[in-house]
Image (cartoon, coloured by chain):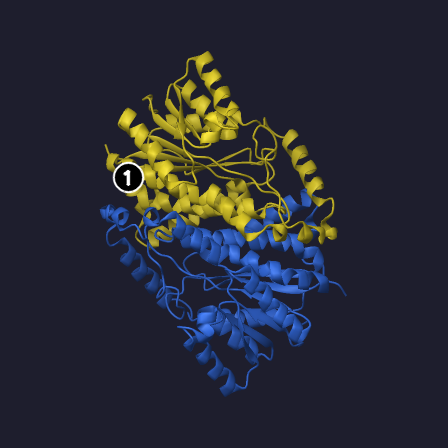
Chain colours: A yellow, B blue
Amino acid sequence: MTTARVQIVLVTGAGSGFGRATAIELARAGHVVYASMRHDDLEGHSKERWASLRSVASEERLDLRPLELDVQEDASCRAAVDRIVADEGRLDVAMNNAAMMMHGLTEAFRPEQVLQILDLNAVSWLRVNRAVLPVMRRANKGLLVYTGSGINCFPDPFTGPYAASKAAGDVLAEVIAFETARYGIETVIVQPGAYTSGTDHFKHAVGPLDSEAARQYGKLEGLSDQLTHRLDGANLSGRRHDIGKVAEAIRDIIAMAPGTRPKRIEIDPRGRDVGKINDLTAQLQRDFFGRMGMADLLEPTVSG
Amino acid sequence: MTTARVQIVLVTGAGSGFGRATAIELARAGHVVYASMRHDDLEGHSKERWASLRSVASEERLDLRPLELDVQEDASCRAAVDRIVADEGRLDVAMNNAAMMMHGLTEAFRPEQVLQILDLNAVSWLRVNRAVLPVMRRANKGLLVYTGSGINCFPDPFTGPYAASKAAGDVLAEVIAFETARYGIETVIVQPGAYTSGTDHFKHAVGPLDSEAARQYGKLEGLSDQLTHRLDGANLSGRRHDIGKVAEAIRDIIAMAPGTRPKRIEIDPRGRDVGKINDLTAQLQRDFFGRMGMADLLEPTVSG
């Protein structure tokens, strides 16, 4: 069974990467898509982001709506959701996607840098949800989609702050899923592989500020390049590896009937097999939640 | 093969719980233990913490040394490590343990609260390590012990910010392990079960500040008490469940020869079986690291 109904969708970080691709794909599927991004991406120093999305929308006659939303500001999250509810009276799908990348030796990152990525990549999910969830809880339905990562299952060298942020976000998303299941709210965590192209992630990756510490790691010299090279190789020899696959997967998930969607989907997991970890974890979780008398929290309670 | 050599050990958060128990146990085993805590625990409003530890030390004639260390302050971490190196010329073992607990509905926590626990429970591990690692890298040896948690593998309802912080810390610890392995530095992440007694964790758990959001969760009423009750029941029917087991496990790990210690130990995992997830993850990790040509990062390079 699939739902053909037009969905009102909010996408954060829609100015580039997975967010942009998904916003376009969902609009093509006929949904009303609020493509949210920071002020700078709409009309500031990176305004070409919205300009480019707008030209796709106008060319293909898509219902893609620009929306200012800074996931690091509570008031901005609330204002954005208020605007959607004022326009449409509801919000069906929220995709928490905005993120940044950091890459480098963990010891050389200053603690403030790690807090910055934890805020942007993980705490922002709570911030956006605190605006979205009251609307969905009142409706007794809704879909939360997250751009997670396979990396948090077992991280690579040089990914410390980034992988930590994705792991923290994953846990917050998972616990919010339990706590909102009885309100009919469904959660899907998308876990893409390492996309070294198609997103701005690697291009805009922030490095560690403490160059003195980094210089002391002579024994790791060349390792970062070696790893990137081999990851690229593994990607190229693998399945089709473009961000469109992520967008299509999310489109298909939205088309599924509420209550039937997978909690997690790995996309292009080649090289990591996080699906096996997800399966084992889900099985242990079912056992544990059953014994604790709260198995119902593992799936949304779908009202008729 | 075991090492009988006296180790110079730093324990953070030694004023209570696992930190206190481990500091005592290691001192009993003959090690020199710097029992570090915040100023308040030494001579401020909670000075009974150090007073109580001091009386154990004096009664049993243990080499337990008080050390002021606030894991949320860079300068404090550096000063503490400088002091140890000035005294002893080396630092063999650092136990990252200081932590706080939060408990409640995720949506009702303010983002600042989540940042606070992420800083104290996860970023602090980097902060302490940034002081400790230069010393250990120069020595080409050292042992990092972390008080992790089984909860980050699959969290419970009401544990959002806490479980997110433990997951983030776990990833940082794991990546730092890879990046320091060639410097002979070994990492052990201890994953205790849910200790509802013996630590100050639950007693001092911080709740969500947004009571308005919490009030809107009528459908979860009674669930938190039900869960605590069942967890207590599972604990009581299980194996000996006191924090001494954690301290003894760390004592035994320190006694093992460098390079032979387990990367992770679960203690009292009853109810969760995180060991199975650890085993599967370790196996996938060996495959992946092998293919990436960096299998040597999975174990410390022990110099002769």
Q: At 33% from the left edge and 38% from the top edge, which residue is drawn?
A: A131
**What is the three-letter code of the residue carrying label 1?**
Pro
Q: Nearer the viewer, residue B77 or A238?
A: B77
Which quarter shows the N terminus of chain A? top left
Q: At 50% from the left edge and 44% from the top edge, which residue is drawn?
A: A166
**Viewed as shown, does residue B289 lie left or right of A122?**
right
Q: Nearer the viewer, residue A40 or B192?
A: A40
Residue A170 percent location from the top left of the image: 45, 44
| Number of marks in the rendered image | 1
Q: To which residue does mark 1 refer?
A: A134
Residue A186 position (above or below residue A221): above
**Viewed as shown, does residue B302 lie left or right of A31?**
right
Residue B285 position (above or below residue A46): below
Residue A264 percent location from the top left of the image: 44, 38
Residue B201 position (above or below residue B58): above
Extreme residue in the front direction: A44
Subunit bearing disc 1: A
Circle 1 SS class: helix
* Residue A7 visible within the image: yes
Q: At 43% from the left edge and 54% from the top edge, which residue is drawn?
A: B116
* Residue B237 visible within the image: no
Q: At 44% from the left edge and 62% from the top edge, which residue is drawn?
A: B193
Q: Quadrant of residue B30?
A: bottom right
Q: Quadrant of residue A128?
A: top left
Q: Nearer the viewer, residue A56 or B250?
A: A56
Residue A263 percent location from the top left of the image: 41, 38
Q: Nearer the viewer, residue A287 or A63?
A: A63
